[in-house]
Image (spheres, rainbow, N blue to C red):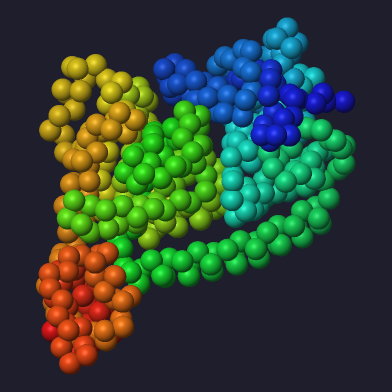
Amino acid sequence: ATPTIGRYDAESGLRIGARALVAHLDLGEGGLRDAAARLDEAVGLAEAIQLDVAHAEVVRVRERRPATLLGTGQVERLAGLAAEAGAGVVVIDGALSPIQQRNLETALKAKVIDRTGLILEIFGERASTREGALQVELAHLTYQSGRLVRSWTHLERQRGGFGFLGGPGETQIEADRRLIRDRIARLTRELDEAKRTRGLHRKRRQEAPFPVMALVGYTNAGKSTLFNALSGAGVFVSSQMFATLDPTVRVVELPSNRRIVLSDTVGFIRDLPPGLIAAFRATLEEVQEASLILHVTDISNPQHEEQDAEVEKVLRELGVADRPRLHVLNKIDRLAPEQLAALQHNGKVLVSALAGTGLDALLARIDRELHTDPPVRLELNLPVADGRTLALLHDRGRVLRTEVRDARLWVEAEIPASLARRLQAAHPAAS
C-alpha cells in the first residue's frame, strides 16, 4: 500500500515534515537556464505546502513512454533516489496521465503527484473563504474525474488539502464517477449563487461609483505586500507561492482625494491548468471589471521577463489584454545600484512595497492614469434630512459651501464627474 505522506497537523491543516523528491521534466523546449529556473519554481511549490525537499533535479525526457512517460532507466534511478532519501512523495513537474501516475507510484513505491496536482494541493491549503474552498474543490473534482483515485479524504474534512498526499483515515475506495458528477453539479449551483451575490456587491460599488483597480502578477511578485502598503489592509503575506487565493478589495484614497477600489488577485504561474483559471473566476472577475490593471513584477527575479510573458498570456485569455495598464517593478530594494540606475526613465513605476519606497509616486501615477473621471463643481438642492447624500459628497469630493434656505440644504461641492451625473439625475434641481 502507498504510505501515508507527512504528519497531518489538525491545528493548521498542513502536513508537516513530509520528505519529497522533486523532478522537473525537461522536454527539450527550453535551455538549461530555463530548466533550472523551472526546477527552482517546482521546489518552491513543494515547499509551499511544507514538503521537506530531500532531492531535486532536472530529468531530460528524450522519448515519451506511454506507460510511465520516463524511460526505464530513469524510473529505476528515481526509485533508488527516493528510497535513499526516504521520500514518501515524488513531485513530477509536468503533466502525467492517470495511467502514468499509477504506474510511477508502483515503480517508485511512493505517492506521485504531477504539477496540476501539486498546485491543487496548495490551493486546498490556502483557500480561506467558503467560496474559495468551493472553487478549489470544483477544480479538484474536475481533475479527478478522469483518474482512478484511491483517496477521498477531501470529502471527510473541512480544511487542508484534497487528498493527493494522503492523510489520516485515508481509504482505498475506487472513485465513484456518479458521485463526482453529482458533487460537481452541486458545487456549480452553489458557486452560481455566490457569483450572483458578488454581482450585487459589484453593482453597489459601481453605484458609488469608485473606479476599480486590480493587482495582477506572477505568484510571489509581492502583490499582497503592495496591496497592504497602499490600503493598510492586513492581507496574509508570505514568500511562499499562492499566498493569496480569495478575492480581497479595499478602498484607497488618491492624492486628489478621489477614491478607488483596489482588488488583490490570485497569482499567475506558467502552465496553470485552464480548469484552475475557470475555478478562480471570483478573483479574476475583478480584473475583467477593472478600469486600470496594475501589473506587478518582481524585478529582482532573473526570470522576470518569462514571468511577465505568462501574465500577458493569462490576460489575453481573460480578454483584458487591451485594458489600461500600469507596470510596477517591485522589490527594487534587492537590486544593486547599477541595476536600479539602468531601470530609470523606462516609463515604469519603481517601488519596494516591503520598504515603502516609491509608493507616493505610484499613487500619483495612478491618479494621472485614472483621468477619465475629472472633478467638476456643482450645486445641489437637498432636503435638510438627506444626510446620506451630504456624507457621500464629503466622502467622494470636497464640500465648498453649505447653506440652509427655505428648509432646504444648498450644497456647493467639487466631485467626480460620474458621481455628479448620478446626483443630477436623482436631484433634478441640481445646477
Q: What is the quadrant of the C terminus in the image? A: bottom left
Name the residue at 77% across, 53% down.
180
Instruction: In the rendered view, tell whether residue 272 sits above or below residue 423.
Output: above
Name the residue at 39% across, 33% down.
221
Name the residue at 61% across, 61% down.
191
Q: Residue 245 placed where, x, y %?
A: 52, 44
Instruction: In the rendered view, tell whether residue 96 sits above or below residue 209.
Output: above
Q: Residue 246 placed where, x, y %?
A: 52, 48
Q: What is the quadrant of the N terminus in the image? A: top right
Residue 320 visible in this rendered orientation of the protein: no
Q: Residue 69 placed where, x, y %?
A: 67, 26
Q: Residue 361 placed where, x, y %?
A: 18, 40
Of 148 and 188, nearer the camera is 188
Instruction: In the rendered view, tell whether residue 315 sits above or below residue 167.
Output: below
Of 134 and 69, nearer the camera is 134
Q: In which quarter of the image is residue 25?
A: top right
**Left or right: where does residue 263 sit relative to residue 23?**
left
Please, which residue is most extreme toward the top here? Answer: 84
Name the residue at 32% across, 24% down.
300
Q: Quadrant of residue 305?
A: top left
Number of residue marks: 0
Residue 300 visible in this rendered orientation of the protein: yes
**Left or right: where does residue 289 sit relative to residue 420?**
right
**Left or right: where does residue 27 sit relative to residue 228?**
right
